């Protein structure tokens, strides 16, 4: 993975969206209306930036190519479920991302020291656990869409659609506190706030219901895991038919 | 202009027509994509409007821009994003593949300008819903205003939009052609696409330091804010000339850069 430093640095750089949104939110009327202070906003969005960096999933793009080019066939012969190979690749890349994210945060610390804060040990531990949970949830959701690659050549297009509610309901571009109550309730019925808002709030040291947040993460994972495994089984059966 | 030049332009025009018709034929094999792209455009637009509404809160402005005026900026962003999906993405993201597979050699041998071929060979119709949605949003926002749009304002606005599109093309082309040296940075254009999201909001909504960055380093201001000012009938001569100068500079820059890059190109295996 270290061979791909330039590529990984650029991917890390492409995750600047929460920081851009922070710049727009800071002096907006919306922040005042929602009663969010400058410090609250900057801690939240910087935390969301970190969460996003370590919960990016690109399984569908790699898998689509592996399936189309037949690279998947030898993986199927191996005694380990091939999805673990992709999990490992994601975790490895996220580990290589750490220095780049550290450099970006250091740059922020130099340019705008007021944006950063030092989380307490418990916030940090809970935050990291929640990020891992968010990654698992994102990975499972994308696994389900990826399995559609067995049926359609353009499953990646469907993933683009799933990205839209993630973008707007997860808290990546707007803190959930600013949502109107009805839309807030709607968002809370989806898995998306668990993917960004919950870990980000933990890291930023906001008052959140920790038990409720982790319970939601676990519940959504428990719902998505069997679906993705069943789709995997059905898909592999179909894949065999295609290659024969 | 003499007959030779006219003949040359005619040849490029005919090539362009052939390129795009054949791309359309290939793409229409995937009709499910149309449904997906329509849904994506509608979803993105609804989401963007929702976030813009949140940013306004109970107030009447964002960085001094009224709701209708901010919608014009969002419309221009949607339009340029559609343009990116139609032309820039399908063509310029292929340059790295040509370099990696050695097929750039074949492009260079063709009796047509290589920059023209690489920039226009494909056309993806899936950006068209975005272009249509952008135009509709701009038109709707302009009609909500009490003062009618002046023909001169419209003309300047269109010229500045074209100028913004040329700046956008140049940025994409520069980053994409860097792959002649560094194959590993094939995803640099993705970074560009994600940072240009800043153009969804008027430039004055950002802190002063970022405004400078978005004008001189990553010229987001020229892409959406400056054409929007013109459409709203409040453009200033300095911004108009600034945009035209930036577009000219950027185009000449890509041309010189491409020639320089080709001198360093040593084909795949050598």
Image: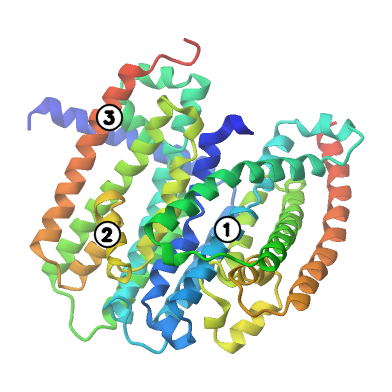
Residue A13 pos. (x, y %): 48, 48
Residue B126 pos. (x, y %): 49, 53
User: Badge 1 local density, few (<14 within 10 Å), some, or many (20+)?
Assistant: many
Q: Nearer the viewer, residue B103 or B179?
A: B179
Q: Residue B221's mark?
A: 2
Residue at figure coordinates x 20%, y 63% from the top left: B157
User: Badge 2 local density, few (<14 within 10 Å), some, or many (20+)?
Assistant: many
Residue highlighted by disc 1: A50
Q: Same chain for marks 1 and 2? A: no
Which marked residue is nearer to the observer: mark 1 or mark 3? 1
Q: Residue furthest top?
A: B270
Q: Same chain for marks 1 and 3? A: no
Q: CA distance from mark 1 to mark 2?
A: 27 Å
Q: Nearer the viewer, residue A157 or A18?
A: A18
Residue at figure coordinates x 33%, y 63% from the top left: B76
Q: Nearer the viewer, residue A72 or B158?
A: A72
Identify the image quadrant of the N terminus of chain A: top right
Residue highlighted by disc 3: B257
Q: Same chain for marks 3 and 2? A: yes
* Observer able to see residue A21: no
């Amino acid at each position: 993975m270290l061979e791909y430093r330039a590529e990984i640095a650029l991917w890390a750089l492409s995750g600047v969206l929460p920081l851009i949104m922070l710049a727009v939110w800071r002096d907006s009327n919306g922040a005042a209306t929602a009663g969010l202070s400058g410090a609250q906003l900057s801690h939240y969005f910087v935390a969301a930036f970190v969460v996003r960096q370590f919960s990016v999933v690109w399984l569908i793009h790699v898998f689509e190519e592996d399936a189309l080019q037949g690279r998947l066939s030898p993986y199927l012969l191996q005694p380990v479920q091939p999805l673990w190979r992709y999990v490992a690749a994601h975790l490895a890349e996220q580990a290589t991302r750490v220095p780049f994210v550290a450099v970006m945060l250091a740059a922020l610390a130099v340019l705008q020291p007021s944006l950063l804060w030092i989380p307490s040990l418990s916030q940090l531990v809970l935050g990291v656990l929640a990020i891992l949970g968010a990654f698992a949830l994102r990975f499972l959701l994308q696994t389900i869409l990826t399995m559609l690659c067995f049926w359609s050549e353009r499953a990646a297009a469907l993933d683009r659609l799933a990205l839209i509610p993630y973008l707007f309901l997860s808290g990546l571009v707007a803190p959930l506190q600013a949502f109107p109550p009805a839309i807030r309730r709607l968002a809370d019925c989806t898995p998306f706030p668990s993917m960004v808002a919950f870990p980000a709030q933990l890291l930023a040291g906001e008052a959140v219901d920790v038990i409720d947040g982790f319970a939601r993460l676990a519940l959504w994972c428990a719902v998505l895991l069997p679906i993705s495994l069943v789709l995997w089984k059905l898909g592999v059966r179909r894949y065999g038919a295609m290659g024969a | 202009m003499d007959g030779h030049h006219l003949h040359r332009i005619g040849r490029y025009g005919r090539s362009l027509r052939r390129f795009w018709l054949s791309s359309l034929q290939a793409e229409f094999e995937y009709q499910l994509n149309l449904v997906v792209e329509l849904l994506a455009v509608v979803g993105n637009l609804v989401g963007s409007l929702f976030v813009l509404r949140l940013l306004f809160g109970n107030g009447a402005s964002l960085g001094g821009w009224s709701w209708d005026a901010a919608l014009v900026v969002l419309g221009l962003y949607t339009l340029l994003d559609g343009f990116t999906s139609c032309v820039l993405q399908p063509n310029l993201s292929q340059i790295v593949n040509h370099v990696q597979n050695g097929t750039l050699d074949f492009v260079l041998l063709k009796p047509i300008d290589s920059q023209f071929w690489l920039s226009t060979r494909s056309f993806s119709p899936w950006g068209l819903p975005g272009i249509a949605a952008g135009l509709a949003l701009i038109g709707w926002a302009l009609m909500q205003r009490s003062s009618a749009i002046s023909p001169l304002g419209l003309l300047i606005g269109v010229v500045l939009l074209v100028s913004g599109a040329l700046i956008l093309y140049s940025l994409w082309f520069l980053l994409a052609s860097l792959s002649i040296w560094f194959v590993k940075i094939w995803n640099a254009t993705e970074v560009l696409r994600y940072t240009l999201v800043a153009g969804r909001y008027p430039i004055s909504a950002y802190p002063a330091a970022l405004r400078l960055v978005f004008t001189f380093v990553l010229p987001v201001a020229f892409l959406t804010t400056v054409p929007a000012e013109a459409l709203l009938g409040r453009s200033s001569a300095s911004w108009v000339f600034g945009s035209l100068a930036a577009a000219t500079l950027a185009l000449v820059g890509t041309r010189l850069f491409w020639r320089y890059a080709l001198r360093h190109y040593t084909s795949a295996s050598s």
